[in-house]
Amino acid sequence: MSKIRKAVIPAAGFGTRFLPQTKAMPKEMLPIVDKPVIQYVVEELVDAGITDIILVTGYHKRTIEDHFDAANLDLIKNLEMGGDRKIPLLNEVKKISSMANFVYVRQKGPYGNGTPLINVEHLIGDEPFIYTWSDDFILASPSRFKQMLAMYEKYNCSVLGGVKVTRDEDYDRYGFVGGKNIEESVMDVKTIVEKPGKTSSPSDLAIVSGYLFTPDIFGYLDQVLANLKEGEEFYYNDALKLMLADKKRMIAAEIKGGRYYDTGNKLEYMKTVVEFALLHPDINGAFRQFLKDLKI
């Protein structure tokens, strides 16, 4: 069984929900207190043993590349002149560029979440890999990626990470899977339905945030792309459905003990910032008091 060492993060979108803020700054770089959203995703991947991270970006995403590059000499010198009190910050910025091997690919092709995958096929080769978003994440212990890697080692097939939904409106936001439960919170997937609505959903397990794909997905992506009509969007889910039709096994696993954070819209982003501020060791007490005293 191949050891999984690569991850792909698509990050080429325009972040239109956050305009005008994202006119010049990528949505992936929106801060959660003092750290950009995408760094939380990268740190979780590295903690799970991923060594090579491929970011599929657009022309307007240079800030992401700069963030994971080595800190510039002026910043390093400034922090060094700050003495002992700046050492933690110095170590933090130095660590960012050394966390993993970063590879950047410019996205090209039809609109849709299948395009970043075909853009990186030559870099993935015949290895299984993780495909995960840059603006949402799940906090869990063990982490979601460690849980998914454990499922892959056990079942040796593609793994779709998921969460159980509790709100009716979520059935119109996510894709849902149906199939046979083979152990607690693990499903042998037989069908995938996009935004089915509560009454038509095959289960309450929504597929969100992160996936572990075997390399045979690329052949099915090629099939989808070859049959794509003018103006149609290119979705990786269509490739997964072809895989299921060919009896390719895949499982869906609920991330146990997970808290899902979706920073892709204003309200959920602000909720995430507030929660993380309440947990931040530098400001949690003062921020909590601020919220208690707030009168609007």
Image (cartoon, grey):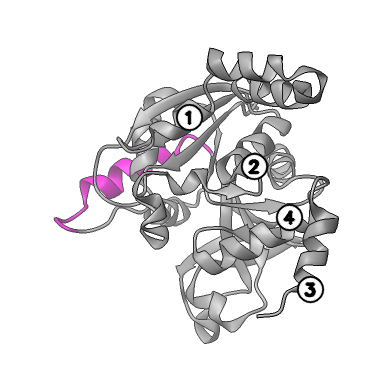
Question: Mark 1 or mark 4, which has the lower sequence index?
Answer: 1
Question: Mark 3 or mark 4, which has the lower sequence index?
Answer: 4
Q: Quadrant of residue 10?
A: top left
- Quadrant that contains the C terminus: bottom right
Label 1 or label 2, whichever lies nearer to me, is 2
CB of mark 3 within 8 Å of CB of mark 4? no
Question: How much space separates mark 1 and mark 4, taking CA atoms?
Answer: 29 Å
Question: How much space separates mark 1 and mark 3, taking CA atoms?
Answer: 44 Å
The residue at 82%/57% (across/down) is 286
* Above/below status of 34 relative to 179: above
Q: Is residue 92 visible?
A: yes
Image: magenta residue range = 214-231
Measured as percent of width and height from the top left, residue 129 is found at 55, 34
What label sits on residue 293 in the rendered view?
A: 3
Q: At label 1, which amino acid type do we have? A: Ile
The residue at 22%/45% (across/down) is 226
Residue assigned mark 4: 277
Residue nearer the viewer, 231 or 188? 231
What label sits on residue 45 in the rendered view?
A: none
* Above/below status of 114 relative to 93: below
What label sits on residue 40 in the rendered view?
A: 2
Question: How much space separates mark 1 and mark 2, taking CA atoms?
Answer: 15 Å
Measured as percent of width and height from the top left, residue 285 is found at 85, 57
Q: Quadrant of residue 46?
A: top right
What label sits on residue 54 in the rendered view?
A: 1
